[in-house]
Image: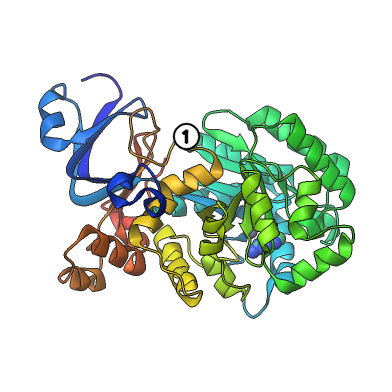
Amino acid sequence: AKAGTIAIRGRLLSFDADPAVAGEAEAVRFIEDGIVVVRDGVIVEVGEGPVIVRRLDPGTPLVDHRPHLVLPGFIDPHLHLPQTQVVASYGTELMEWLAKYTFPEELRYGDSAVAGEAARFLFDTLAANGTTTAAVYCTTHPVSAEAFFREAERRNLRMIAGKVMMDRNAPEGLLDTAELGYEQTKELIAAWHGRGRLEVAITPRFAPTSSEAQLAAAAALAAEHPELPIQTHLSENDAEIAYVAEAFPWSKDYTDVYERYGLVRPRALFGHCIHLSERERRALAEKGASAIFCPTSNLFLGSGLYDLAASRALGLKTGIATDIGGGTSYSMLTTAAEGYKVLALNGQKWPAFEAFRMLTAGNAEAVGIEDKVGRLAPGLEADLVVLDSRATAPLRRRMERVETLAEELFALMILGDERTTVATYAAGRRIYDRYQAGHRPLAP
Ligand code: GUN
Ligand code: ZN
């Protein structure tokens, strides 16, 4: 066998396009008995199992996951490293939640050991949930991002993260300055951006915690690094929006603040985007930015209901994310299930094919990494998740009455969670295996 070649067999599911736009026949690629051939971490062939298995070099390791599903690894385009111990904090809306729970916790992340331990927990947990890429907020402290990147590099993961820029309206120990935020982000880019599969995101937390001088510094970073991802929060909560209107009296609306500072562009990821006007949606869409829907967070913090139909109507790309720790689940399946319910409250429908497309190729496109991951296709990185749609008694019971793939996927997304993960692969290496002792993640 060629060095570094493996073959993975299962029921392959991948999306070439958005089923809502192209139609199911064009968009859905399903092979009931398929094989993905991986060489040196990259997919080199995808096709019918019986055909490929005959041509494989003798001795090539073949992992047969049938009857389980093999999909591109899930992508989580918005979550917070320092909030794994903020999850499930009681009784507040956004602004009070930040002040009461989140900022005090984030103060701990000036300690590299604290951030490193959180990063190990986070990567183990993401792997157990089939998530292979995430876009992550660290804290203001550069050491929090450095610890994150060190651990991601050790595991050869495709990850995006940034040091938060925040120079007002938070505890002293969490504040940088316009100049420091700029310099520290620059240093992080020089040290980590493009190293292995890592990317640095320009990360002004949100308009309420940045002065205009800091937004101008973020604008300078964005102009100097036109290829970099940007991540921030937008239009999540009524009190937040009212504060932005007051703090930036010149602005037409919340989105206008980010537009003014050159932060609305391709690969700019705007978390939440719940209460946008048509003007704002249109501006985000026209400038190629992405809205990130965070359903478990929006329900938990009582923020509001994302309007997918309105985004679609104006051509605004949407991704879906956990938003740990405003969000309450690390599972992208659970996140999709809650997304379905949010849309239901808005009178909208969301077929399973569209949901699974968003968890994979759709999120890849929203983040601007669709040429790297998100589909089962030659040339893309072999980040994969293997799912058992009969992993639990409720799933097994429900599947007895399921007749189509669409029904199976819908039940899997509504009833599934980390228990449905059979295995997760990053660059062709198994990073999670449920058959390992105690169903715990494999050590890297
Ligand atoms: N807006 C600014 N910071 C945050 C955060 O940490 N979580 C959420 N959900 N919204 C924010
Ligand atoms: Zn967030």
Q: Residue at x 53, y 54 (%)?
A: 318
Q: Residue at x 74, y 47 (%)?
A: 141
Is residue 408 or residue 109 the one in the foreground?
Answer: 408
Count the numbered circles shown: 1
Q: Is residue 326 above or below residue 223?
A: below
Q: Position of residue 298 (x, y in %)?
A: 58, 69
User: In which quadrant is the N terminus drawn?
Assistant: top left
Please indicate whether residue 108 sits to the left or right of residue 373 in the image. right
Please indicate whether residue 13 sits to the left or right of residue 111 in the image. left
Q: Residue 301: which quarter of the image?
A: bottom right
Q: Position of residue 422 (x, y in %)?
A: 28, 52
Q: Residue 393: which quarter of the image?
A: bottom left
Q: Is residue 77 above or below residue 45?
A: below
Q: Which residue is mark 1?
A: 156
- Of all residues shown, which one is farthest toward the bottom? 91
Q: Residue at x 33, y 46 (%)?
A: 27
Q: Residue at x 39, y 51 (%)?
A: 357
The image quadrant in which ligand 2 is located: bottom right
Q: Is residue 129 above or below residue 162?
A: below
Which amino acid, by three-letter code, is at mark 1? Asn
Q: Residue 377: which quarter of the image?
A: top left
- Residue 177 seen by the camera: no
Q: Position of residue 189 (x, y in %)?
A: 69, 32
Q: Residues within 10 Å of mark 1 (few under 14, many from 20)?
A: some
Is residue 46 or residue 107 the one in the foreground?
Answer: 46
Q: How is the image coloured?
A: rainbow
Is residue 270 or residue 310 the one in the foreground?
Answer: 310
For label 1, the SS is loop
Q: Position of residue 343 (x, y in %)?
A: 48, 70
Q: Mark 1 near ligand 2 (CB under 8 Å)?
A: no
- Residue 190 seen by the camera: yes
Q: Is residue 133 above or below residue 104?
A: above
